[in-house]
Amino acid sequence: MTATPARTEPLRSLSIILFWAPLAATWLMMAAEGPYIAAIVARMPGAARNLAAYGVAVSLAWLVESPIMMLLSAATALVRDRASYFALRRFATILNVVVTFGMVVLALPPVFHFVGETLIHLPPEIAHLARAATLILIPWPAAIGYRRFYQGILVSHHFTRRVAYGTVVRLVTMSLTAGVLALTTSLPGAILGAIALVSGVLLEAGASRWMARHVVRSIKESGVVAEGTLLELGAIFRFYSPLALTSMLSMALGPLVTFGLGRGRAPLQSLAVWPVVVSTLFLFRSGGVAYQEVGIALTARGGERVRRTGVSLGVLATLALALLAFTPLETLWLERISGLSSELAGFAIWPIRLLVLLPFLEYLLSVQRTTWILARRTGVITVATAIESGGLLLVLLLTVGLLDLAGAVAGAIALIAGRLAANVFLSLMGRRESTQAR
């Protein structure tokens, strides 16, 4: 087997879709990971406190992990030859050490006491469980950074199916670990969930490295340094730091919306239906999240075709969501499948309808980001995310404070307004660059 980073045959929409489909499936499977473990924890003794502790630990781990989320995109864009492989691997290793150190500091008793009990106001019993789960999750961010580095190499060399295979390994490992521990031990649910999560991620990281072994061998045998290759850690840092900041800003969007849910009208109903709203939306927009790597890997072979295909997929995703949101399927989905009461289902449908354009905007955002990543002007992406965060907060304050809307409705309006602001900014920046290039 040899690496195949460049191909000369004409790029067709079907080829793009076949390249994209395993990545989209990966994001769908990852979306199922959290609810799946939570469902196991919910069926164990002390479900309420263990679910709370597990949720806090995972949320904190996600926050610490956020700087390494873009390593997949970075590896896809930057690893071209032996020199760039070793340069980015050194950078990724440093980044993984930093996030691991962050997890260790977070798990220290004084620090976690301040975060868990002082800031989050957890009861002492739940804070104790959450800290124990956080200790178990210490290897989690670095394992994710390690496997995202090698997944990026797989994507850039057109082995996207192997990325999906790795996710299958992760889910199977989690399932087996959780099942065995539930049957053979009396561990608290939060501890069991954390062990299952870490086991799955560690084995997926190892599987990703193993599946990339032939590609890595081919890269190491390449002695030619491609033009424009980033070899200095400082240059890589300047390229990557805006992407890391983008991930961290994106992580702040969820807490911002939750802040609004609890302060708008009908806070209890809003908080109750919001997880269903978010999970429903993610089913239709997850493919758009995956499309960023498609653009990075394939734009050189046919940028206009990649853009048109991404936009077309976005239109189809939004139409599919509209079919669910504006037809009797809404009752089937919200009441029969999601398990909401008829009252809560009626409350949830309007936020979903207001967000019906979000899948299209997700695909569009990935297409727009691709341009700036390939141009190595990642700071533009950070500015767009800051505009999205600021727009979301501004609209949230307006809809909750002045208009006194229900929290879930206000959150939906704020989400779509923030994303539209980011899309418009990137579109205007793209047009300005095109004008200046003429």
Image: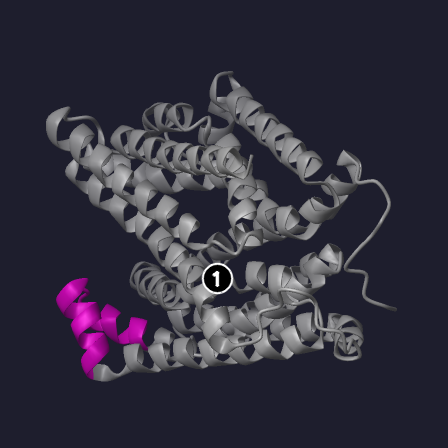
Q: Where in the figure is residue 434, as x and y percent of width and height?
A: 53, 35
Q: Main secondary structure of the magenta part?
A: helix
The residue that appears at 53% across and 21% down in the rendered structure is 329
Query: Would you place residue 146 above or below residue 243 in this image?
Result: below
Q: Residue at x 77, y 78 (%)?
A: 223
- On screen, residue 252 versus residue 35, left or right, reads left
Start-end of magenta stretch:
110-131
Percent x, y for residue 341?
A: 37, 30
Location of residue 179 by image quarter: bottom right
Residue type at the position of mark 1: Met
Nearer to me, 107 or 298: 298
Looking at the image, residue 407 sits to the left or right of residue 233; the answer is left
Residue 43 visible, this orientation = no
Residue 138 seen by the camera: yes
> Which residue is found at the position 36% from the left and 77% from the top?
103
Q: Residue tagged by mark 1?
A: 69
